[in-house]
Amino acid sequence: MEWESPFKSDILKGKVALLTGGGSGIGLGISTEFGKHGASVAIMGRRKSVLDSAVSYLQSLGIPATGFEGDVRKQEDAKRVVELTVKQFGKLDILVNAAAGNFLVSPEDLSPNGFRTVLDIDSVGTFTMCHEALNYIKKGGPGRSSTSGGMILNISATLHYTASWYQIHVAAAKAAVDAVTRNLALEWGTDYDIRVNGIAPGPIGDTAGMRKLGPEEISNKSKEYMPLYKLGEKYDIAMAALYLASDAGKYINGTTMIVDGGLWLSRPRHLPKDAVKELSRTVEKKSRDAPVGVPPSKL
């Protein structure tokens, strides 16, 4: 379904955003809404075909958009793409780290190399992009005023807030991403006036992640204990990103916003509601009827 944005269409007017993983899934959802709200958009990805189709789509909406091939695991790619973005659009205001790797695997079947690959893309890749963007996104950077820096947004997850089956590599990687977000918010917020925040999406329909990780994730049984029983949409994450990137979020720094309908809080209901009422009545009656135990006085 096509939702109408509650935000003014010019809240990112004049801003330049660079998004890794911006050509598909959640990344493309954010690219689209940033563009619709006034930003110029550069997307970075490994697959030329995906980039090309995403750029055509964005341009068809009248969004100034460009795509750069690159791998966030390679420092030289990160540096080149950041520089090309600034060369094309004159400055850099917003960096979104949405590139991620994922697959389902039990820990004993996951090779240390497979574990490392996901950490390299998600955690090291996020840091590498931040590192290369710093000189452009800090206050006084090219095209920026000497008083205001830009904003970094890291796409995280909720897996590591508890624990998740078959996701040890991603849980470890996203825990590192959250730590990077907080540390940069402290240090770069203080020294360079850069706000650094995150978004932790729940399961989002119509994304590669959802197709890979849980086509049957939401079964009828789950309905009994899941808040807002439904999948999120790319729109939900994009709206949270817009809020954080715009002046509406100007005092928010170092936060990872959970956007999952409360799903990460879900637990199977261990007693039906009627049984709880019955139980509490019985317990109350017992406690009323029981003699009040007063310990004998020592005096």
Image (cartoon, rainbow, N blue to C red):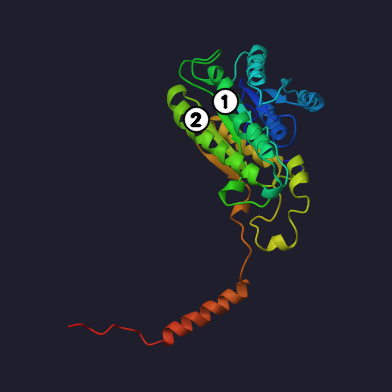
Q: Position of residue 294 (x, y in %)?
A: 30, 83
The amino acid type of the residue labelled 1 equals: Cys
Q: Is residue 39 above or below residue 24?
A: above
Question: Can see residue 167?
Answer: yes
Q: Quadrant of residue 243?
A: top right
Front residue of this view, candidates 274 and 133: 133
Answer with left or right where residue 116 lies relative to residue 175. right
Q: Position of residue 64 (x, y in %)?
A: 71, 20
Q: Which residue corresponds to the image point at 47% horizontal and 26% vertical from the top-left?
A: 188
Q: CA distance from mark 2 to mark 1?
A: 9 Å
The numbered dot on residue 37 is none
Front residue of this view, candidates 130 and 117: 117
Q: Is residue 231 above or below residue 126?
A: below
* For the residues bearing labels 2 and 1, Cβ distance under 8 angstroms: yes
Where is mark 2, residue-wise?
184
Q: Which residue corresponds to the image point at 66% horizontal and 37% vertical from the top-left?
A: 118
Residues packed near mark 1 inside 10 Å, few (<14), some (14 to 19) or many (20 plus): many
Q: Which residue corresponds to the image point at 75% horizontal and 58% vertical from the top-left?
A: 219
Front residue of this view, candidates 200 and 232: 200
Dot 2: what SS? helix
Q: Position of residue 266 (x, y in %)?
A: 61, 57
The amino acid type of the residue labelled 2 equals: Leu
Q: Is residue 269 above or below residue 11?
A: below
Q: Earlier in the sequence, mark 2 or mark 1?
A: 1
Number of labels in the image equals: 2
Q: Quadrant of residue 208?
A: top right
Q: Position of residue 182 (x, y in %)?
A: 49, 35
Which quarter of the rendered picture does the C terminus lie within? bottom left
Residues packed near mark 2 inside 10 Å, few (<14), some (14 to 19) or many (20 plus): many
Where is mark 1, residue-wise?
130
Which quarter of the rendered picture does the N terminus lie within? top right
